[in-house]
Image: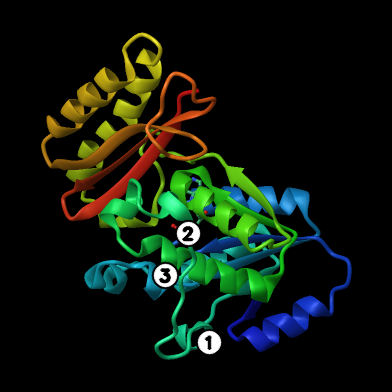
């Protein structure tokens, strides 16, 4: 695997490969099987796979979350090499951002709903970094996880608004055997907290099983109560949303997704499941 830390080096290398399809997997590292499933998918459908590891400061709304974000770069390199990733881009912050750089993209309501409400400014940081990474890598296809469902919609919206020539590919959520969605932040969970955190996927599964039987409002209320009743879990939201707009779902929504966020101890977790 080739490893680059500067834009100039990676640009020079990628532009020397004419007519190759590039599958791109942007990450913040601390890689797990969820990330590796994206690498796998990109590998199956492209001549070349590029992964980036960059803990993007502009998308963090909490300084201690940024500081404590896990950065096991040697282990990550070993995992990517074993997965057959061709190129890793692992730049320092100074390679991506100038001092006091400004960015704003109007992506409408998507920015402010759900995650946007609890993490103000988060999606401006996400669009800012993904725009820069796409400009550097110029991939054929961009692979992102359903785990961050709203992020996928936000980036798709940016790609549409700015006419960026890239195909968006959403990959399914990889879970631990008990159902917990894999996440780099799971390393912060104690064994007890991991047990408590199972209530997220269990409640999503319950909602999926009861969808169509109970009205949407009742499902949301009962799901919130289930989360609230789990010791050590502080739910932020549980909503059934239209899969395209993320506005509240109604019976006419062609895609419906249940999305939830909760704090388990000090760790904030998100998860979702498609219901229709
Ligand atoms: P992150 O490193 O958390 O920024 O994630 C990088 C990419 O991996 C994003 O597109 C995520 O949606 C995706 N991802 C994270 N966790 C999972 C998971 N459990 N299953 C599938 N994809 C995931």
Q: Which residue is mark 3?
A: 72
Q: Residue furthest bottom?
A: 99
**Chain-order first, disc 1 or disc 3:** 3
Mark 2 CB near ligand 1 (8 Å cut): yes
Q: Which residue is mark 1?
A: 95
Mark 3 closeness class: few <14, some 14–19, many ≥20 residues within 10 Å: few
Q: Are marks 1 and 3 in contact (CB under 8 Å)?
A: no
Q: CA distance from mark 3 to mark 2?
A: 8 Å
Q: Vertical placement of 127 versus 173: above or below?
A: below
Q: Nearer the viewer, residue 269 or 77?
A: 269
Compared across the picture, whether 211 is left or right of 88 comes to: left
Mark 2 closeness class: few <14, some 14–19, many ≥20 residues within 10 Å: many
> Callout 3: helix, strand or loop?
loop
> Callout 2: helix, strand or loop?
loop
x, y percentage for residue 188?
26, 57
Compared across the picture, whether 246 is left or right of 16 comes to: left
> Callout 1: helix, strand or loop?
helix
Q: Residue furthest right?
A: 19
x, y percentage for residue 262?
24, 44
x, y percentage for residue 261?
29, 43
Q: Which mark is residue 31?
A: 2
Q: CA distance from mark 1 to mark 3?
A: 20 Å
Q: Which mark is residue 255?
A: none
């Amino acid at each position: 695997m080739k490893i680059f830390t500067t834009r100039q080096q990676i640009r020079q290398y990628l532009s020397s490969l004419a007519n190759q399809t590039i599958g791109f997997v942007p990450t913040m590292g601390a890689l797990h099987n969820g990330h590796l499933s994206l690498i796998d998918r990109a590998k199956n459908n492209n001549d070349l796979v590029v992964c980036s590891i960059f803990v993007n400061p502009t998308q963090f709304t909490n300084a201690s979350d940024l500081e404590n974000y896990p950065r096991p770069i040697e282990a990550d390199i070993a995992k990517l090499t074993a997965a057959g990733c061709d190129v890793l881009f692992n730049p320092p912050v100074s390679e991506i951002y100038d001092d006091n750089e400004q960015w704003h993209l109007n992506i409408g309501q998507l920015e402010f709903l759900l995650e946007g409400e609890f993490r103000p400014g988060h999606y401006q940081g996400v669009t800012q970094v993904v725009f820069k990474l796409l400009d550097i890598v110029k991939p054929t296809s961009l692979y992102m996880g359903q785990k961050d469902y709203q992020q996928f919609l936000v980036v798709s919206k940016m790609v549409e608004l700015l006419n960026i020539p890239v195909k968006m590919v959403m990959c399914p959520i990889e879970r631990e055997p008990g159902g917990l969605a894999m996440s780099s932040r799971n390393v912060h969970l104690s064994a007890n907290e991991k047990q408590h955190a199972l209530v997220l996927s269990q409640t999503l599964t319950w909602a999926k099983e009861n969808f169509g039987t109970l009205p949407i409002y009742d499902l949301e209320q009962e799901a919130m109560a289930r989360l609230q009743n789990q010791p050590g879990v502080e739910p932020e939201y549980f909503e059934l949303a239209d899969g395209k707009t993320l506005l509240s779902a109604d019976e006419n929504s062609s895609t419906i997704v249940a999305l939830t966020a909760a704090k388990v101890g000090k760790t904030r977790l998100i998860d979702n499941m498609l219901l229709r």
